[in-house]
Amino acid sequence: MDFAQKVRRAIAMAEQINRLAYVQQGEIHERWSELTGQAVDETFHLIPPVYTDHGVNIRVGRNVFVNQCCRFNDVGGIDIDDEVMLGPNVSLITSGHPLDPARRRTGITSAPIRIERNVWVGASAVILQGVTIGADAVVAAGAVVTRDVPARSVVAGVPATVIKVID
């Protein structure tokens, strides 16, 4: 399957999920498992709508909560550990384009995003390619995360910086 086919498949499968009500978690689990190619734990909760560009590069752990309107651009891979909460409108963006104007329309850059155990990502936060969010960290609403976040810290702002360490 080529790149464009993968994108069309992911969008069509996300549209199927987006037609489901939140109370239809069993069917959401089935569709999510089909989208990602991996079984999802019964403790996974997702409030549609959700968006993705590939789907097959997403792994979610146990007791993960995904609020409405989250975006998983997963070309580079997204790995979400147990007990993670994603607020509404969170964007996980693993890909981009080269800075060189001559290559911008013909190339894609990508790197994985890893969200470790018990992280809370606030509403409308954006996490960019190559970032790891350490265990028990908090990403404040509206933050744009361009670098790794240490475990047990709170980051906020654009670009996100550590504003607090959690004792």
Image: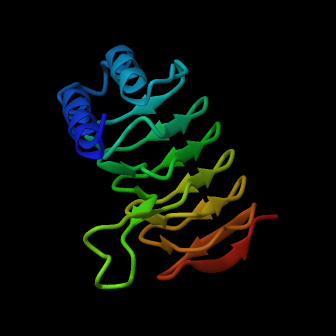
Could you tell me which residue is drawn at 54 percent across and 74 percent down? 146
Q: What x and y, as percent, mark residue 84?
A: 58, 44
Q: Is residue 105 above or below residue 102?
A: above
In this rendered view, identify the residue nearer to me: 49 or 105: 105
Q: Residue furthest right?
A: 167
The quarter of the image holding the C terminus is: bottom right
Whether residue 77 sits left or right of residue 83 in the image: it is left
| Residue 62, horizontal then vertical, whole percent | 61, 29
Quadrant assignment, res 106: bottom left
Q: Is residue 104 above or below residue 96?
A: below
Q: Is residue 93 left or right of residue 111?
A: left
Seen at 40% across and 56% down, the residue is 90
**Looking at the image, residue 146 lies above or below residue 34:** below
Q: How is the image coloured?
A: rainbow
- Residue 157 is situated, as x and y percent measured from the top left of the image, at 50, 80
Q: Residue at x 43, y 52 (%)?
A: 87
Position of 102 with respect to 19 (left or right) is right
Task: Name the foreground residue: 139 vs 59.
Answer: 59
Identity of the residue drawn at 39% across and 34% down? 46
Q: Is residue 1 above or below residue 165?
A: above
- The N terminus lies in quadrant: top left
Total marks placed: 0
- Residue 71 in percent (x, y) is at 34, 51
